[in-house]
Structure formats: structure tokens, C-alpha cells
Amino acid sequence: MDVAAADFSVSRAVMVDGLLRPNKVTDPRLLKVARELPRERFLPEDRRELAYLDADVSLGGGRVLPQPLITVRLIQLASPQAGEKALVIGAGTGYGAALLAACGAHVTALEEDPALIAIARPALATYAPAVRLVTGPLTAGYANGAPWDVILIDGAIATLPPAIGEQLKRETGRLVAVMQPPGPQAMTHVGHAVLAERSAAGLAMRPAFDAATAVLPGFTLTPAFVF
């Protein structure tokens, strides 16, 4: 192991023991993969030293790699089970999709930004080869694989297009996301991670914990569902 790799290994351990464990991450699958998965490989080379900070990492074009605690806690909130079908919307460079796949889910990662796809493709091929990377508009979801047991929106949203909610499996499906207040107040108000479940009556959301990250493009319109 070279010096740089060793340094990142130490940083991963600090992230798990100093950030994730003290902040209610208890799923042993997620703790294990967070300790082993090289998060730096899901970033451009000039930003890899930022991989283990407790902060979003800018990827350009208004996109970020969300801080690790948010992504890990969202996946834990979804409680993915081995063999379930999962969709990651706004997969970015693929880190969240790789974490989810390590929990045993069959993961499809949806992204529309060519620059992010160019990072995600080799990273996923190396560290989570079972993940299926697809391209298309994020706001449309991915109906080809629906219904989904789990949908992870890997970024904040102020609105949830109805088409995405309809792609969730009825009764047992779970959708997790960060709901951020729309408009100028988004800069001063903390959002909430939410768990949404679909029933015959529609999509019901409940808040889980405070969280804030960058809103994904296309999800900033007047919301149909907002907490």
C-alpha cells in the first residue's frame, strides 16, 4: 500500500468511528462498506483530498457529492434488503449507488450529467460492478425497472415529480430524500431527510432527521409534496 492509499485508509476509519458511529449509523453493512470503499475514487483527482470531510464536495455545475453522513443515513433509513430492486436518482459519481449495492440490493443508478457519468462509470466498474448505470433526465425517474423496492434520491429536492412516486412499489416500497425548502429560504432553512411510502391513498412522507445539501437540477419547482 502506498503512502497516499494508507492516508486515505486512516481517513476512512476516522470517518466511520468519528462521524458515522457517533451520529446514529448502526447498520453493520454500512459501517463495513464505508470503512472499505475508497470514497476518493468517486471524485475528480483534484478533489480527492476532500473525500472524507464532513461537508459536500463541489463537482461543478451546481452538483455535489453529498457529505457522507447524509448519504449513509438516508440508505440506513431506507433499510434495503438483499435482493431488492433499488433506483438511485441523481447518482452523480456513483458513491451512494456503491454503498447501496453493498447492502445486497440490485441497484440501477440514474444520472444525466456526462461529466459525472465519466467519473462514475470506471469507479462503479471497479468497486461496484453489479450496479447498472443508466442515463436520462433525473426528474423522469426510470420506469423501465419499476416498480422499485427502494428509491434513493442522492441530493436535495424541493419537489417530487408524481412520476417518480408512481414508480415506487405499492405498500412495501420506500423512497428516501432530503426535502429542502424551495426558493430563497432554502439558503437559510435546514431541510429534512424524509422516508416516503406509497399506498392506495398516495405517497406519505415523514421526516427523519435534519439535513441539507444541494438541490438537484429540475427539482426546484413549486412542490407537489413538501415537508
Image (cartoon, grey):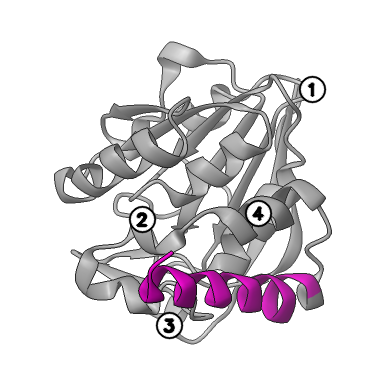
Q: Main secondary structure of the magenta part?
A: helix
Observer-nearest residue: 186 or 61? 61
Q: Earlier in the sequence, mark 4 or mark 3?
A: 4
Compared to residue 207, the image places residue 76 above or below, namely: above
- Distance, label 1 to label 2, CA atoms, is 34 Å
Q: Callout 1: helix, strand or loop?
A: loop
Give the residue at mark 3: 187
Residue drawn at x 67%, y 20% as measured from the top left: 169
Say if the magenta span includes residue 20: yes
Pointer 4: what residue?
A: 74
Which tag is nearer the camera, tag 2 or tag 4?
A: 2
Q: Nearer the viewer, mark 2 or mark 3?
A: 2
Whether residue 88 is visible here, answered yes or no, is yes
Mark 1 neighbour class, 10 Å CA radius: few under 14, some 14 to 19, many 20 or more: few
Against 6, residue 160 (above or below) is: above
Quarter holding residue 174:
top right
Binning the other alpha carbons within 10 Å of mark 4 as few (below 14), some (14 to 19) or many (20 upward) gives: many
Tell me the residue at 60%/40% (across/down): 100
Real-space CA distance between mark 4 and mark 1, rounded to the nearest whole angstrom = 19 Å
State which region is magenta.
1-21
Depth check: give the residue in front, 9 or 18.
9
Disc 2 or 3, which lies upstream in sequence?
Answer: 2
Question: Foreground mark, 4 or 3?
Answer: 4
Mark 1 sits on what residue? 171
Q: Amino acid at mark 4?
A: Leu
CA distance for labels 2 and 4: 18 Å
Magenta stretch: includes residue 139: no
